[in-house]
Image (cartoon, rainbow, N blue to C red):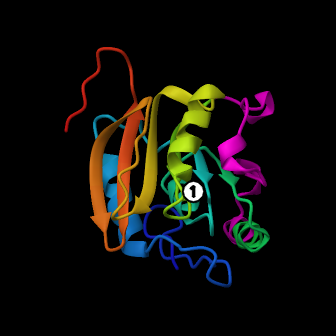
Amino acid sequence: MRIVGGKYRNRAIVAPKGKSTRPTSDRARENMFNVIEHADWCPPIKGARVADIYAGSGALGLEAMSRGAAFCLFIEMAAEARGAIRDNIDVLQLFGHTRLHRRDATQLGDKPSNLGDPFTLVFLDPPYGFGLGPKTLSKLLEGNWVSEDAVAVLEVGADEEPVTPGWVRQVVKEYGAAKVLFLTRDHPGMTSPD
């Protein structure tokens, strides 16, 4: 696996060993960031506060950091994955600009005050087929984790049709067995582009 764009382009990153994580392919990641960087409904990546939830290798958050994000919080339960994220943060020397939390993303609670301002860009790549993404999206709103103009990027199985109350679909892309939903916060009077 490699970083595909920005400051750390072509730098190798490690994925956790075993089959418990399913890293987003380099090509899919590049396509996802093309959508984010060219969408008028998405805040700029430069200076963004990013959360990479169900982070796995941390590739999505690291990609955002490479492209100018100011800070990334990685949330991951699996020990092997947290080890891979630590290794990747170390290799890219991003310790001062990242945090790694071991936390159940469906039980986030209120955003801790020591994490600073709410997040503007959130990646969620949960295990497919368990409905974890919509639960986590609800917790992000309930706990004031995200800014008013936040964008969430949710990866699900291609056959899944998640319901995402409080969020509006802007774009849906399919990459093989994965479907990626690009979501903005739902505000009264706002209409979906679908």
Q: Is residue 180 above or below residue 164?
A: below
Q: What amino acid is at disc 1?
A: Gly
Q: Is residue 159 above or below residue 146?
A: below
Residue depicted at 48% across the width and 43% down the height: 46
Q: Is residue 130 above or below residue 10?
A: above
Foreground residue, 66 or 177?
177
Return the x and y of residue 94 as percentages of the image width and height.
Answer: 70, 58
Q: Is residue 48 visible?
A: no
**Residue 115 part of the magenta segment:** yes
Q: Is residue 152 above or below residue 130?
A: above
Q: Residue furthest top?
A: 189
- Residue placed under numbered mark 1 in the picture: 61
Q: Is residue 11 visible?
A: yes
Return the x and y of residue 88 as percentages of the image width and height.
Answer: 68, 70
Foreground residue, 121 or 135?
135
Residue depicted at 74% across the width and 72% down the height: 87
Q: Residue furthest left?
A: 194
Foreground residue, 135 or 186?
135
Per the image, label 1 sits on a secondary structure element best described as helix
| Residue 39 as seen in the image, left or right of residue 16 | left
Q: Which residues are magenta?
A: 88-117
Residue depicted at 61% across the width and 63% down the height: 58
| Residue 144 as seen in the image, left or right of residue 79 | left
Task: Please identify the quarter of the rendering in which residue 5 is found.
Answer: bottom left
**Residue 130 part of the magenta segment:** no
Return the x and y of residue 111 as percentages of the image width and height.
Answer: 72, 31
| Residue 102 as seen in the image, left or right of residue 179 | right
